[in-house]
Every structure is written in structure tokens, then in C-alpha cells.
Image (cartoon, helix red, strand yellow):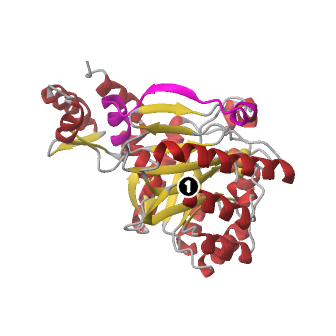
């Protein structure tokens, strides 16, 4: 039995109609009966896992993928009902589903809203149809506009759109076109990720000359942040922006090292300081295999996660939680190296990375980690 007070629940839906050119998430193309079998097993695993967490209050439920939008609204509803019958849920849980434009019709959005879905994360990626083709996406910008409008008319008032920064062929002008699209759509949240070339993807096999240089990526990222800010979307994390009060409650749990339980192949968990995950394999998932992955909620993780946030890393709080850093002077000295470069600010015992700092966050964070014993 785990003595945790609250929990974020993540459900992985590992199916996609086709594979996008940049993506290495775990997903396969599946037939309807395979999806049905998966849901049946998933519901059984949710029940089984709930026995270990029957004192925990679920604050957030997140359907990620893959493409959860490939499941019908009824199937999503059945999983939500299973989760609600197995776990205790907070009074006002955030229930998010990731979907792609074109996945659902108007009636489906009403069905999702009736099942308790109150947040959508829609994979727009770009509002420029040529970029969408390059990325290997199946939708067009009008499909995305229609999806947002249908969701809004179903009463779902918390919608996030994903954007990709650095698609081959992207310019400041096409990026602005995508940002303007998001603003005009009236959404509350935007995630803007810098394109990363993952191994074993079609992009990985392309000539590197097709892709932006680091300097070009940095310029586009900074341009994106400024545009979003002037449109009223405050940056609260390296890649995340929102209207006031619309931070992703589920993702904030990851960055604040709060407990979360991930179910499904490639679903990761961190509960009670213990990390574990389901391997990226259907066979293993059906066989109930779980891999223990060591300790979580360490000072190291805290530094890594908090420095991603615009609120930054508070050294006093960190000291209360971990007894680290036992010599705040060393942290302050390292800040003096980066502060004149415009990469971070150190004020009131709190280190916050600037946008320029976010661009080189791996290096800066790595440097702070060397100060831990
Ligand atoms: S980006 Fe999304 S829709 Fe495309 S292959 Fe990856 S998980 Fe599937």
C-alpha cells in the first residue's frame, strides 16, 4: 500500500493512423479489435493498480499517446468511468485528452465533455499546410480550426495547441502565421517545442542541411516566446505558455515532483520516491511486466525540473526538502558566472533561467548538478 495523498494518472494510448516524420513515441497502427482488446486490458490494469493507491486522490487524468483521439468518445468514457470507479477523484479533476485535428466530429466532442473531459491538447504543430506535409501530418489548418470550434461549442473551455519550432522550410513569417492561428482560435494554452531529430525517424535519415542550425532555432524560439507573450500567453515553462490560470495541472505535477502513475506500454511512474515503467512493448504490457527504475524525487531531479519553470529554483525550499544545497554560497557563485551572460537571474534565493538560458538549459543545469555531493 502506498501512503500518498494525491496522484496524477497518465493513460497511454499507443495507436496512430500513421507515423509522423519526426516522432519516436511508442505507437502502432491498429485494427479496431486490437484497440478493443487493449482497452479491456487497460481497464483491468487500472483496477489492479488502484488496489495499491486506494488512499490517493486523483487530481489529474491525462490521455496521451500515440493518438488517444483514435478511440471513440464512448471508449474514452469507459476508461474514465473505470478510473473513477477504482480511484478516488478530487472534486474538480483536470481530465485531458490529446487528439489530432480530424479525429472527432461535433457529437464526439459532446460525448467527451459528458464523460468529464475538460481539457484538450490538440496536435496542431503548424498552421502552414506545407509545413504540415513536411512533418508528415494528416491534417490541414482548416481541420484544426474546425476541431477547436467544435470543442468550444461542446463547452470544453480549456484547449491547448501544440506547435513545432524549426520545421524544415519554416520562417519567422510562417511561425507567426501559426501563432496568429492559435490566438485567433481563442485557445488558453500553447506548447511550442523545438524540433528534435530522434533516432529511427524519417527525419533522422534526411540530410542535415534540411534542418535549422542552432542559431536559427534560437532565433525562432525567441521570436515565438516574444510573439506569444505579446498576445497574452505567459511563459511558465521552457516550452509552455498560457493565459492566466491555465497552466497544465498534470504537467506541473512532473515539474514539481508530485506523484504520478503512468499506465500502458512506455508509461512511466514516480510514486513515493520510486520510479518504474512499463516497457515499450505490448507483449510485456499484456504480461504485466513492470521495470523498477530506481529512486525519484531526488535533489538532482528537483534542480532539473524546477529550472525548467519560469518560477525557477528556490534554494531555501530545496534545502528544506533535501538538505541541499548545504552551501548556498556555491550556488550563488555559479549564478555569478551565468548572470552577466544574461542566462539567469538570482534574486531572493531563487534562480530563474532567462529565455536565452532556457536555450542552453542542459549545460547550465549540468553545471549546477556538479555542486551536489
Ligand atoms: S506525433 Fe503524434 S500522431 Fe504523429 S506519430 Fe507521433 S504520436 Fe502519432
Count of residue discs: 1
Image quarter of residue 153: bottom right
Q: Quadrant of the N terminus?
A: top left
- Does 54 appear in magenta? no
Does residue 253 appear in this view? Answer: yes
Does residue 135 appear in this view? Answer: no
Image quarter of residue 166: top right
Seen at 83% across and 47% down, the residue is 34
Seen at 15% across and 26% down, the residue is 326
Residue 129 placed where, x, y %? 73, 60
Seen at 58% across and 56% down, the residue is 83
Secondary structure of the residue carrying numbered label 1: helix
Boundaries of the magenta span: 283-308
81 or 221, which lies in front? 81
Residue 57 placed where, x, y %? 42, 55
Q: Is residue 156 left or right of residue 104?
A: left
Q: Quadrant of the C terminus?
A: top left
207 or 240, which lies in front? 240
317 relative to 208, above or below: below
Q: Is residue 78 left or right of residue 325?
A: right
Residue 78 placed where, x, y %? 68, 62
Q: Is residue 324 left or right of residue 126?
A: left
- Does 290 appear in magenta? yes
How crowded is the residue under tag 1: few (<14 C-alpha within 10 Å), some, or many (20+)? some
Q: Is mark 1 within 8 Å of ligand 1?
A: no
- Residue named by callout 1: 86
Q: Is residue 213 left or right of residue 133?
A: left
148 or 136, which lies in front? 148
Amino acid at each position: 500500500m502506498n501512503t500518498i495523498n494525491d496522484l496524477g494518472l497518465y493513460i497511454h494510448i499507443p495507436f496512430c493512423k500513421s507515423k509522423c516524420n519526426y516522432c519516436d513515441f511508442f505507437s502502432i497502427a491498429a485494427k479496431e479489435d486490437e484497440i478493443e482488446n487493449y482497452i479491456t486490458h487497460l481497464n483491468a490494469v487500472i483496477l489492479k493498480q488502484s488496489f495499491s493507491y486506494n488512499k490517493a486522490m486523483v487530481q489529474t487524468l491525462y490521455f496521451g499517446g500515440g493518438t488517444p483521439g483514435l478511440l471513440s468518445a464512448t471508449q474514452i468514457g469507459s476508461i474514465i468511468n473505470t478510473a473513477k470507479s477504482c480511484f478516488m477523484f478530487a472534486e474538480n479533476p483536470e481530465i485531458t485528452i490529446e487528439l489530432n485535428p480530424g479525429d472527432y466530429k461535433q457529437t464526439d466532442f459532446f460525448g467527451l465533455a459528458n464523460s468529464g473531459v475538460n481539457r484538450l491538447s490538440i496536435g496542431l504543430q503548424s498552421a502552414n499546410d506545407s509545413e504540415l506535409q513536411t512533418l508528415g501530418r494528416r491534417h490541414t489548418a482548416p481541420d484544426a480550426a474546425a476541431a477547436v470550434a467544435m470543442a468550444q461549442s461542446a463547452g470544453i473551455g480549456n484547449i491547448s495547441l501544440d506547435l513545432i519550432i524549426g520545421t524544415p522550410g519554416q520562417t519567422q513569417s510562417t511561425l507567426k502565421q501559426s501563432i496568429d492561428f492559435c490566438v485567433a482560435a481563442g485557445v488558453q494554452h500553447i506548447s511550442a517545442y523545438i524540433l528534435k531529430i530522434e533516432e529511427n525517424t524519417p527525419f533522422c535519415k534526411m540530410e542535415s542541411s534540411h534542418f535549422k542550425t542552432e542559431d536559427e532555432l534560437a532565433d525562432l524560439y525567441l521570436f515565438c516566446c516574444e510573439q506569444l507573450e505579446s498576445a497574452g500567453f505567459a511563459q511558465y515553462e521552457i516550452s509552455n505558455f498560457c493565459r492566466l490560470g491555465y497552466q497544465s495541472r498534470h504537467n506541473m505535477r512532473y515539474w514539481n515532483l508530485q506523484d504520478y502513475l503512468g499506465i500502458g506500454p512506455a508509461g512511466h511512474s514516480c510514486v513515493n520516491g520510486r520510479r518504474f515503467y512499463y516497457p515499450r512493448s505490448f507483449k510485456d504490457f499484456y504480461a504485466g511486466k513492470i521495470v523498477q527504475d530506481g529512486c525519484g524525487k531526488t535533489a538532482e531531479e528537483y534542480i532539473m525540473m524546477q529550472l525548467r519553470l519560469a518560477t525557477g529554483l528556490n534554494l531555501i525550499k530545496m534545502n528544506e526538502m533535501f538538505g541541499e544545497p548545504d552551501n548556498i554560497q556555491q550556488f550563488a557563485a555559479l549564478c555569478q558566472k551565468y548572470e552577466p551572460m544574461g542566462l539567469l537571474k538570482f534574486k531572493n534565493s531563487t534562480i530563474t533561467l532567462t529565455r536565452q538560458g532556457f536555450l542552453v538549459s542542459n549545460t547550465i543545469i549540468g553545471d549546477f548538478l556538479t555542486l551536489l555531493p
